[in-house]
Image (cartoon, rainbow, N blue to C red):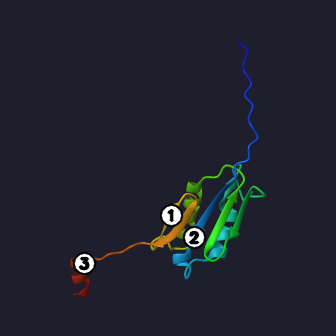
């Protein structure tokens, strides 16, 4: 039996992801986050190799858009966002939540003290 040839179709995959930091706009450094993404996103196994394949832009107030013309995972963007929050010591107060498909939000943790804990704090 002769081997069959498998040809790949040249289809461009374009995906858009948005990071919305409107609830944490007072403490979040968007310029630092954009430079962090430019340095850390891997394309073809190499960091800092974005070229025209991936574009990172500010979109309106308190939003950053990542447009990828190649296969790019939203989970990877979430991972890098968490890594940036850890680097800037905001990981203890902020979390990354998927609001809808392709949209990630930074939200504060909801800390609710029970009555027993409040009484212990007052003493």
Residue 6: percent from left, percent from top: 72, 28
Nearest to viewer (mark 3 / mark 1): 1
Residue at image position (72%, 21%) is: 4
Most distant residue in the bottom direction = 122
Q: Are marks 2 and 1 in contact (CB under 8 Å)?
A: yes
User: SS at mark 3?
Assistant: helix
Label 1 sits on residue: 99
Q: Quadrant of residue 40?
A: bottom right
Which of marks 1 and 3 precedes in the sequence? Answer: 1
Label 2 sits on residue: 20
Task: Report the label total.
Answer: 3
Label 3 sits on residue: 117
Q: Quadrant of the N terminus?
A: top right
Q: Which mark, residue 19? A: none
Nearest the viewer among 73 and 49 is 73
Does 46 sit left or right of 81 as displayed? right
Which of marks 1 and 2 precedes in the sequence? Answer: 2
Vertical order, 56 against 9 (above or below): below
Residue 85: percent from left, percent from top: 54, 69
Which of marks 3 and 2 precedes in the sequence? Answer: 2
């Amino acid at each position: 039996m002769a081997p069959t040839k498998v040809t790949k179709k040249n289809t461009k995959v374009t995906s858009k992801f948005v990071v919305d930091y409107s609830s944490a706009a007072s403490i979040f450094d968007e310029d630092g986050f954009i430079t962090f993404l430019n340095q850390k996103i891997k394309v073809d196994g190499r960091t800092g190799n974005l070229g025209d394949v991936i574009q990172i832009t500010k979109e309106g107030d308190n939003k950053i858009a990542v447009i990828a013309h190649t296969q790019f995972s939203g989970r990877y963007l979430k991972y890098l966002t968490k890594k940036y929050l850890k680097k800037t010591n905001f990981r203890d107060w902020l979390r990354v939540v998927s609001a809808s498909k392709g949209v990630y939000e930074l939200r504060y943790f909801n800390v609710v003290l029970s009555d027993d804990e409040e009484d212990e704090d007052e003493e």
